[in-house]
Image (spheres, rainbow, N blue to C red):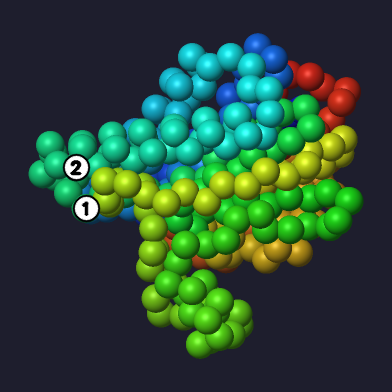
Amino acid sequence: MIGHFLTDTGLVRSHNEDAGGIYTNDHGQMLVMVADGMGGHRAGDVASSIATSFLHQKWDETGFIPSPDDAEKWLEEGIQEANQKIFQHAIEHEECKGMGTTIVAAIIGDDFASVAHVGDSRCYVSNSYGFTQVTEDHSLVNELVRSGQISPEDAEHHPRKNVLLKALGTSERVDVDIKSIEWEEDNYLILCSDGLSNKVSDDELHQYMIESESIEEAAKQLITLANERGGEDNITLALIHYDESTKEGES
């Protein structure tokens, strides 16, 4: 498997509140993460950093994960612990009151990918069935679409598009959505913040991913495209390709 992580501040924000990375253990399994922080006084970057740093440390202390069930358990426990750390930090630091972060994280083994998320950072997969969004946004607008109150087209330009229904760190416990999918030769996985998904369509994501010379080039082109369309938000993505010819991950 090969992976590439890239983040960009964008053209409007003064600092980057996104965080994440790709981490490979001694067994070739990957932990992939993207977090999009929120909160005033630069607290968003504190929240996203706490979440991703904690999960990275936990991963470094973890051995082989034998099954999707074990991966899902690891993600549930890790994200709950990260949530507690952010929540407690906000209590102890007045300047961080109200901070939180989205998280989308995947553990990728030889034949499975287990994906967990809270918020509206997304995961997509490209496989023999096509190109599919694995996660479902925990956002007000998505709930309005699900309930039939607005159309998907209306959602694209809704004034409350960025309102989240869930985030890490805003309450003592959080409900985490977790699922596992099959992972096979030549599959691709994309994890990204809404700074990318708000600017680039699913069709464009798929096209750039499979037609670029490399996943590194695809990542650069996608961030350039998001910036060309305004770049109002931080832009972060992680691309993974199941390539049997390469056993080591890159980050």
Q: Is 155 left or right of 124, judged from the image as shown?
A: left
Residue type for callout 2: Ala
Taking 215 as reference, is 40 above or below it?
Answer: below
- Give the residue pinned by disc 2: 90
- Check disc 1 and report its element: helix, strand or loop: loop
- Check disc 2 and report its element: helix, strand or loop: helix
Give the camera-side residue of 131 and 4: 131
Q: Earlier in the sequence, mark 2 or mark 1?
A: 2
Asked whether the residues under the numbered discs 2 and 1 touch, taking CB atoms below 8 Å apart as contact, a structural biologist would say yes
Q: Residue at x 12, y 37 (%)?
A: 92
Q: Residue at x 68, y 23 (%)?
A: 66
Mark 2–mark 1 Cα distance, whole angstroms, equals 7 Å
Which of the image's four quarters has the N terminus?
top right
Q: Is 147 left or right of 221, judged from the image as shown?
A: left
Q: Is 94 left or right of 161, judged from the image as shown?
A: left
Give the camera-side residue of 70 and 40: 70
